[in-house]
Image (cartoon, rainbow, N blue to C red):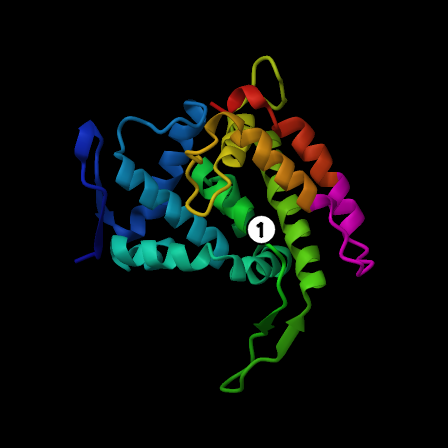
Amino acid sequence: MAARVVIGKGAGGGLSVELDVDSLDLWLAMLHRAMVDNNYVKPEWIDEEAYESMSWLGYLATTTLLNVGLLAARGQAGIERLYNAMTGGQNAGPIAYVIVNDPRQDKMRDWVQQLTPEGLGALLYLLVSEPRAFEVEEPGRGRSGGRIQSFSSQQALDFQQIAIANCLGWIVEGVTMSVYGPLCRFSREDPTPSQYLFTKAVVRMTTDGQPPHNYPDTAYHNHKLALDRFMEKESGTNSLQIPASKRDYRRYVAGLGTEICAS
């Protein structure tokens, strides 16, 4: 018998999700399509708790590249605990390092493109965290451990800036690949789903990916300013990749950022 997971309570007319863990990829893809079709408004067929859990799963799949079925098998409480652990600012450097250097770039691109505004908002919030020195262990062969690499806070800043540019670049690439519908353009008068995704994600640049309650009317402006200022920081490492990433970021945001999508 296949393992099953129950997500959500089915309250308020929405559906909870009970399904084989092996089919969660399909459910996440179906949620993505429904969000695209509705300009990133939660579809009525899924309840709030199930939607939140699936947003967490998308975030975790993006930041860990683990099989989503294995993540879901932890149960709803386990998913929430892992999500809370992976959104801590101490993980910004290591997660950015993975986004920039992991060879499974196509897989990571696909997950980023399917993130909900809550998932993308939490990821952007993490990536603008204060850069900290960190270590990563490279995979070893056989029973021997891998080599430990240490990075300074200045190098962490580089990784985080490149990761932000990469993530937004994948979203822009998705526009050209019809990931967000058939319209391969940006418009301030008639925004496309990718613009709704980015703008709503910026509003949700918080630890839990939820819009802030204390400044809802200015959240987009405040968070966009924080994102821009973070991308303007200088690490002093003279990384050859940083100037191109910063140029790309400005170009991507010029197309994606549309304040009328923030509500």
Place of residue 212 in the rendered image (x, y in percent of width and height, measured from the top left) = 44, 36
- Position of residue 63 measured from the top left corner of the image (x, y, whole percent): 49, 55
Closer to us: 216 or 239: 216
Visible in this render: residue 215?
Answer: yes
Residue 70 found in image quarter: bottom left
4 sits left or right of 88 in the view: left
Q: Residue at x 72, y 35 (%)?
A: 250
Which is more toward the observer, 239 or 262?
262
Reply above or below: 66 against 224: below
| Residue that appears at 30% across and 47% down | 23
Residue 177, quarter of picture: top right
Farthest residue in the top direction? 189
Residue for point 44% across, 28% down: 40
Circle 1 is placed at which residue position? Answer: 127
Queried whether the magenta region covers residue 235, the answer comes back as yes
Magenta range: 231-247
| Residue 240 horizontal side relative to residue 139, left or right | right
Quarter of the image with the N terminus is bottom left
Q: How many marks?
A: 1
Q: Amino acid at mark 1?
A: Leu
Instruction: Give me the residue at 61% from left, 24% from top.
Output: 184
